[in-house]
Image (tube, helix red, strand yellow):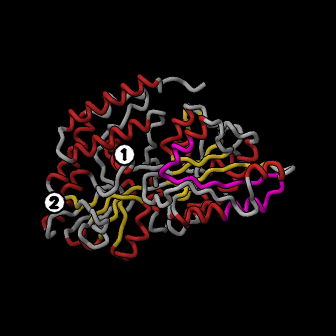
Amino acid sequence: MLSALPSQKLQALVVIMCALSGNPAEMESTSAGKTTLDVWFHAGQEAEREIIQEQVIRFNESRKTVEVNLTFIPERDYNAQIQAAAMADDLPDVLEFDGPYLYNYVWQNHLLPLDDYIPQKIKEDLLPSIIAQGTYQGSLYSVATFDSGLGLYVNKDMLEAINARIPTSAGDAWTIDEFNTILTRLSDEDPDGAVLDLKLNYSGEWYSYAFSPVLQSAGADLINRETMFATGVLNSDSAVTALKYIQNWVAQELVDYNTDDAAFTTGRVAISWVGHWEYDRYSKALGEKLAIVPLPDFGSGSKTGQGSWNWGITKACSNPDAAIDFLSFLLETDQVLAMANGNGAVPATKDAIAKSDLYGPDGPLHLFSEQLLEGYSVPRPRTPAYPIISSTFQSSFMKIINKAPIQDTLDRAAKLIDEDIEDTGYKSVIK
């Protein structure tokens, strides 16, 4: 998913030079006639690490004039490593980074616009969500080989027992009134009354990723996408009303705190609000009883989160054409499917989705690709201020589900965000 989820297994900097690669300094001098690209990748899931290593080996073996040196950076320290490298004027040529940081890196003048380099055919095959997330002030700065999906995993047997309808597409979401009725009926039949998992056992970016779509579905947002300020939107009547529903679910003890992360797999709850990454575990636990439906419609249509790790070319790169050659290789359908099949994420290209057993038209996870293809997903605010917006919303959300006054909490959050934007000059235009 998204960055903040789930694995952060490596605690120390791990540097793995791919096969056929040696000491970087030595390589610069011995790879005569070849362009050497230094590439950074996050050390996330083991499957992702294995696949990108295999892809780099295949790329190096297939090219006579370009060679990739791959370096894994621990996910927890990733942004700090980038900032330190930038200060030391030592950024790599090609950089993978978490989507929410893109606009801050562009604002810091670290990334090269890709518009003049990326082939139009590849650009046209990318999901609209990838283009939207990678675009800032009219220029494309990043691409990605996978995206993410958010929805409700449901236990069909439990829903059928209360005669609830089960939505079948992104445009068929439960209305918020319908969802509230379902929660009440499920709770009436449940031993402890807690029937909904909101993944309150997660932390960090999860809360912005998972619950900003609630604001957008209600006609509000984290920030005004035109003025790029929060006041009047984050603390609007629509936002207050939307978050009141969630506050009530928790206050009425309809939500399982899920401290063991087993609320859904053990049958304690009928509904789990989470992303694509839980499909493998949930399908093994529930089998044919599992269904995936869109998030509720809070009044302006169901919305969902999007975004994951992106690729960009830094301004330190002396051969952007070689860098684009590497990124184009990663975006070939076979390579996109290899990564998506390994980490379970949504393939980032239309052709790969069409050929995916999981996300294709008949796949069990088609809802997630449908949401990204048909405009139900909303990119994170495209501003370098996103880190402060997200952290402020996260802390406000936690206060609200713990009974804090919603209007006052959002008023303070909007004020804090706007003051930070003013103080840092984030409204300035990229030169």
- Residue for badge 2: 184
Q: Residue at x 50, y 51 (%)?
A: 308
Q: Is residue 24 left or right of residue 203?
A: right
Secondary structure at numbered mark 1: helix
Please tell me how many numbered marks the rendered image carries: 2
| Residue 26 vs residue 267, the one in the foreground | 26
Which-is-in-front pick, marks 1 and 2? 1
- Which circle marks residue 208 in the picture? 1
Amino acid type at image mark 2: Thr
Q: Is residue 300 visible?
A: no
For residue 76, above or below residue 316: below
**Which secondary structure, mark 2?**
helix
Instruction: Give the residue type at disc 1.
Output: Ser
Q: Earlier in the sequence, mark 1 or mark 2?
A: 2
Does residue 57 belong to the magenta stretch?
yes
Image quadrant of residue 162?
bottom left
Write the start and end of the magenta stretch as one range: 54-82
* Residue 276, x across and y down, in percent: 43, 61
- Image-quadrant location for residue 378: top left
Is 241 part of what is drawn in magenta? Answer: no
**Quadrant that contains the C terminus:** top right
Q: For residue 300, which numbered disc appears in the image? A: none
What is the quadrant of residue 83 in the picture?
A: top right
Front in this rendered view, residue 146 or 52: 52
